[in-house]
Amino acid sequence: MKRTYVVVNIFWLVLSTAVCVESWSLKVGGVHNPGPGFLPFYTAILLGLLALISLLQTLKESEGSASEIWGGIQFGKLAILLGTLFLYVFLLERLGFLFGTFLLLLVLFRIVEPYGWKTILLSSLLTIGGMYLFFVILLESRLPRGFLGF
Amino acid sequence: MDTFNQLLLGFSVALQPINLFYCFMGCLIGTLVGVLPGLGPTAAMSLLLPATLHITPVAAIIMLAGIYYGAMYGGSTTSILVNIPGEAASAVTCLDGYQMARQGKAGRALGISAFGSFIAGTIGIVGLTLVAVPLADLALRFGPPEYFALMCLGMVILTFLSSTSMIRALMMACFGILIGTVGTDAVSGTARFSFGIIELMDGVGLVPVVMGLFGISEMLLNIETKIDREIFKTRVKGLFPTVRDWIQSAGAIIRGTVIGFFLGILPGGGAVLSSFVSYAVEKRVSKYPEKFGTGVIEGVAAPESANNSAAQGAFIPLLTLGIPSNVVMAMLLGALIIHGVTPGPLLLTNHPQVFWGVVGSMYIGNVMLLILNLPLIGLWVQLLKVPYAILMPLIIVFCIIGSYTIANSIMDVFFMLIFGVIGYLMKKLKYEAPPLILAYVLGPMMEYSLKQSLLVSKGSFKIFFSRPISATCLIIALILVVLPIIPRLRKKRPGAVLPDEG
């Protein structure tokens, strides 16, 4: 656990440094004439200082168990879910809302609870039908049609 | 008298059929998200925000407001029957509510919760009605230094009340400010941190950020663990509290109402804080404090009254000053701006129908919620039986569509997923989201107020301390920042309140 927080605090330090550098290039200005980089620059400095304090506090603490944070996580399930979601976003405009979301729901229902395929198919069809009715028909939202044209 | 006439105007707006419909929808959806764990009012409001673009500003705010105070009613149902809070402000109701259910008193617990919420909510709206106009008049005298100081105070209070570490909460506030700077600087027109990505020129949208941090991250967390919901298997009957229940609860309801109202107004406060403080106060003043946690009715009446009056009180700083006091109000601020309505002291002058229409709808909404939560309680109990495995994919798809339909941009969905991962990591590492959200919403306004103040004072920070209101706010903020550093006081610092508020 201690190692995790050391890494996290180093991340904040790196982020605050990067923001400071970028803000400097935007022109920080002074108190008489603050530039666009004024607020992000000083906020990043404050963030860096806080990260440093947090890092020092973490180093003084006793070693904890990483399992307190990461214990019991089903990394496989999580990875599949995230991978599916990002892939869906990448392909949504190509596949279209109806087809793409139907495929997504098949995977989601399967991941969350391993129902039988009949249940999953039926649930996915009902869900997509309901969503189409609510968003496209009732709310007149414009959702991507994809290569199938619907 | 003028307030009375304005209130009549409000009722005339709220009673229009279309606004009545959206008020009812807000109350219904609010109760629904309150009943169902995993989706709080903030996430629900962010999901429905794109849908409100098709309706009038008044109807939109009436519905979104209804979701917020409706969730306060609905959250108690699942707390009492399932021992899982439907939303954060009902967490403390679990302590005594579920014990009452186990003793066969579920109906009385639900009844006192609903009636207490109604009484407190109504008193809260009366308070809002009476306080809003004088406060708006006062706020007309506010300048950039006062706004800057008030916003600083709000953020500091929220971080001070962090349940984990104030340093981490401050870091989240800084991170939120930095996210808020992404996009085009309003003063100079310079692109900041957009790295050539066109979709970032207008900044990262509020809806993807909130949906990601609250909605998607919650789904990612829930995929790890199986939520077992064992509904207390008893027929819910006897919803009307007995005379004895009323006698026992009267003081708790009144105290909860007052505590909730004032904590709701406070920047950084809100329904969750109010419910915890109210419970603690009730336990302190009780003749039998040792019985709290075993099923005493005051332990249900107090927090449920507090969270409802806080929900009403929280509208005061938003509508009169244009400053959101908590995360949910920050969402509403975003919604108002999207609809072209700028909340603040001029709202009463420029858009009286919006202000008084929302106030009028709250009176009506409270009555609707009493009906929804008592006679229809059986319906909500049935809903609790819907497997979470069915709800979760629906919520994810809802989030995705909601994000996409804001600007028909796939990048918004992408940002939502990114913030979903960030929110998940934040929850695992005990970094809290509310300071981030509040800072993200307030950041641009703070920057504008700061720059204006420095321009007026020709670069001197003395302007913040030479004006009484801004000086008072900043001094209190400084004290709150320094306080935890003092080791002796650090051990006694009240903690354990920060919510997700949604």
Image (cartoon, coloured by chain):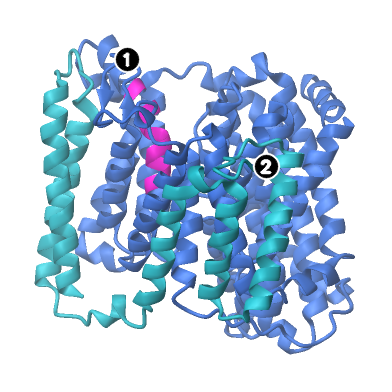
**Above or below for B296 versus B467:** below
Looking at the image, residue B64 sits to the left or right of residue B113; the answer is left
State how far apart marks 1 and 2 are (Cα).
32 Å
In the picture, the disc for residue B187 is 1
**Residue at 13%, 40% in the rendered image:** A18
Is residue B423 highlighted in magenta?
Answer: no
Q: Look at the image and give the residue range highlighted in magenta.
A: B436-448
Looking at the image, residue A127 sits to the left or right of residue B204; the answer is right
- Residue named by callout 2: B65
Looking at the picture, which amino acid does disc 2 mark? Ala
Residue situated furthest front in the rendering: A148
Looking at the picture, which amino acid does disc 1 mark? Val
Q: Say which chain tag 2 marks.
A: B
The quarter of the rendered structure image containing the C terminus of chain A is top right
Position in image of residue A64 (x %, y %): 20, 80
The quarter of the rendered structure image containing the N terminus of chain A is bottom left
Q: Say which chain tag 1 marks.
A: B
**Above or below for B388 versus B44:** below
**What hue represents chain A?**
cyan
The dominant secondary structure in magenta is: helix
How many labels, in total? 2
